Image (spheres, coloured by chain):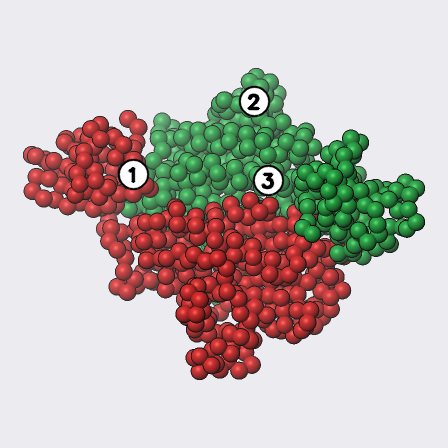
Chain colours: A red, B green
Amino acid sequence: MKRVLAADAGQYIGKEILLQGWVHRIRQLGQVSFLLLRDRSGVVQTVVETGGWDIPDDITNEAVIAIRGEVGEDKRAPGGIEVRVKEREALSVISPSLEVSPIEINKKIDLLKTNLETVLAFRPLSLRNPDIRAIFKVQAEIIWAFREFLLKEGFTEIQTPKIVATGTEGGSQLFPVQYFERQAYLAQSPQFYKQIMVGSGFERVFEVGHAYRAEEHNTARHLNEYVSLDLEMGFIESEQDVMRMETGLLKFVFEHLRSTCEAELRLYKAEIPSFKEIPQITLAEAKEILKSQYKKDLGGAKDLDPEGERLICRHISKETGEELVYITAYPTEKRPFYTMPCSDNPELTKSFDLLYKGEEITTGGQRIHEYDRLLKNMKNFGLRADDFEFYLQTFKQGMPPHGGLAIGAERITKQLLNLSNIREASLFPRDRTRISP
Amino acid sequence: MKRVLAADAGQYIGKEILLQGWVHRIRQLGQVSFLLLRDRSGVVQTVVETGGWDIPDDITNEAVIAIRGEVGEDKRAPGGIEVRVKEREALSVISPSLEVSPIEINKKIDLLKTNLETVLAFRPLSLRNPDIRAIFKVQAEIIWAFREFLLKEGFTEIQTPKIVATGTEGGSQLFPVQYFERQAYLAQSPQFYKQIMVGSGFERVFEVGHAYRAEEHNTARHLNEYVSLDLEMGFIESEQDVMRMETGLLKFVFEHLRSTCEAELRLYKAEIPSFKEIPQITLAEAKEILKSQYKKDLGGAKDLDPEGERLICRHISKETGEELVYITAYPTEKRPFYTMPCSDNPELTKSFDLLYKGEEITTGGQRIHEYDRLLKNMKNFGLRADDFEFYLQTFKQGMPPHGGLAIGAERITKQLLNLSNIREASLFPRDRTRISP
């Protein structure tokens, strides 16, 4: 007999089917047991009529079992159907559960009660919880939609090395790798490589890959290894072309989620933003708003702090109803050396961040494409051109104006689903102290 | 005026269009210059009528330029069209080429003449060569098709950590990472994590990600960092279910390439294999064939050597006409500790390799899902259960029979396109001595 998935059982009313999955919960009521079976498609209720026999002892929560039964309609059951099981022989254990799980798998995991540390320490088990699994269904769909949109826009997918000889932004915050007899590093971003790929004639490239930051702080919004959704595109007029691409991309991603993740979004009370355009303000304007509206004076700061990001989003939401806002025109000294300065003011750059519900999810901008200017800027930043020789090759040989951006996959998932800690949006997070599981 | 791509120019016959791209080649014939312009879509011929003026000096090979001209039909031109340019003002340089490229970009790169070392040292420039770029178009389509097929089969995409505390197969061939004050390693494969994800209820998962092997040898078929196309699936009967999945997957991938990469495949004289089933032989049978047909005695060897792989493929091709063959039933001691032994002979395993045109492109098999057996096997392999505690969690709590496989993205690209060195199939290869570009 062929296995039927829980979600498909409703197509077999009046017929006998074979189910396989995990015992999600057992409730005994006199001579009837309600056994919920969980598989990758969902949970289905089975009703075991144990007249004169008991459910075998090894059929416990989290055991993997097979069940044969007849599908019947029952309005009270989840999904409106149940699978009726008559004989003991219709139940068999495929793989037993050897002990009681230290994590509650069949209940809502309320993170206020269950410590996040415990959830992460027992990640292989907590991922079985359907509420937690839902996060990664949403994340997989975000990544799918990211790729699909860009392929339609003429982008090519690339895979670039994560073992590199030099950092993209000088030597700080790098994880050293012992590469045979040499020292290498883990890539902080695919920045140089995606620029090279634009120059190589692909013009438009994207990558879904890991990025590494050896940042010492241990916050609710940082991971030391994260999934970066990167794109880079040539033949642009300015950073506005990159922002336009991101606006279109996010519209597509959000619409895709609306149609594929309805239940998961409801579970997390996540509302899909619908927007025509994403508002833009300069960093200077943002600081002015913070000062005048919220009595928050950032002084000479070259960036917003986390509280500033939250307040600006609150302000924009109040004024325009939008949950997203681009912050533009960051100072030259706070952006990497390859960032294109504004033509009318070399103290500012053609760069942007995108804030979503109070937190940055993207950094992007136009890059310098002129060899001489790039060389000069490296010197200004105290970098040695010799260390970047392979990168500079590209710029000597006709490099089009270009720009790009990176979206943190865990960040956008966290913000969309209203998660309080970014670790919840990473299957196996790596942070200041955690490299296992 | 909006930019038109080279490949779309034919839709504008009789109209003036704006092209932007790299100067691929210039040929002057009296008062007419033929200027080939290259962009991400291909190459288009422009005809510049220089009556009384010269092509400006800064319009050289590899300069990025803009050209306005009228599209006309010309049967002699590539694609049957050419773009006719009348005035000097119709040409402008967007970004100049500052020196002559050390790599020939507009010719066929014959690797017998141009040293592979040179091609790789100047990778940012050699990738501009359309023949070389074609390899990565094909690779991107292979990866797209891998994902697309598995999504249709109910798989979920996952991203698992590459910074890990322990190796999947003990301590050898690992790259050490300095992770703050601790020592960590780069993941050799997502093996443990994909198994955990099967157990977590996703049942069927895949990942496209980097894998790292600190192998000392420097051969034409090994990379130290490569892209692994991994899948893992639960509720299988045996390794045959995994092989069936791979056979269906490869059919889909190859058919997809047939429809999307015709020109690229022709360029590399690559024939798409068409098969109904992929033949299977056991390792013992393969050794017997080598001995009887090719006088090659592998003695007590537990695996084929590279020559053995080539000869077996030659034999299978002669006998069945197929270019692919599964080798099964590898000895227990040559496979990792998590490999399921054959039920009728614990010396052999339910594992397989897939050979394609003389080289292994996949390793896979059924895994052990019983906790006790796994624990015992770890001991047999000299591993400490304590080091794998997070992995073992899954097996204590109901783990379905499962198996999976990994395809090397660069390997399958190399074999399909008849490349002689795997480095040609990696954008920026990492090998024994190379971490740049």
Image coords of residue B359 (percent x, y): 59, 32
Q: Evaluate whether residue A167 shows in this view.
A: no
Label number found at residue B322: 2
- Give the Cα distance between marks 2 and 3: 22 Å
Give the mark count: 3
What's the CA distance linking mark 2 and mark 1?
Answer: 39 Å
Report crowding for label 1: few under 14, some 14 to 19, many 20 or more residues within 10 A (C-alpha).
Answer: some
Q: Which mark is residue B139?
A: 3
Which chain does the residue under circle 1 lie in? A
Tell me if B225 is positioned left or right of B132 in this view.
Answer: left
Quarter where residue B206 is shown: top left
In the image, are marks 2 and 3 on the same chain? yes
> In this orientation, which residue lies closer to the viewer: A343 or A113?
A343
Label 1 amino acid?
Ala
Chain at tag 3? B
In which quarter of the view is residue B304 placed?
top right
Dot 1: element = helix
Residue A7's disc number: 1
Q: Nearer the viewer, residue A374 or A424?
A: A374
Residue drawn at point x = 48 percent, y = 48 percent: A145
Q: In front here: A312 or A37? A: A312
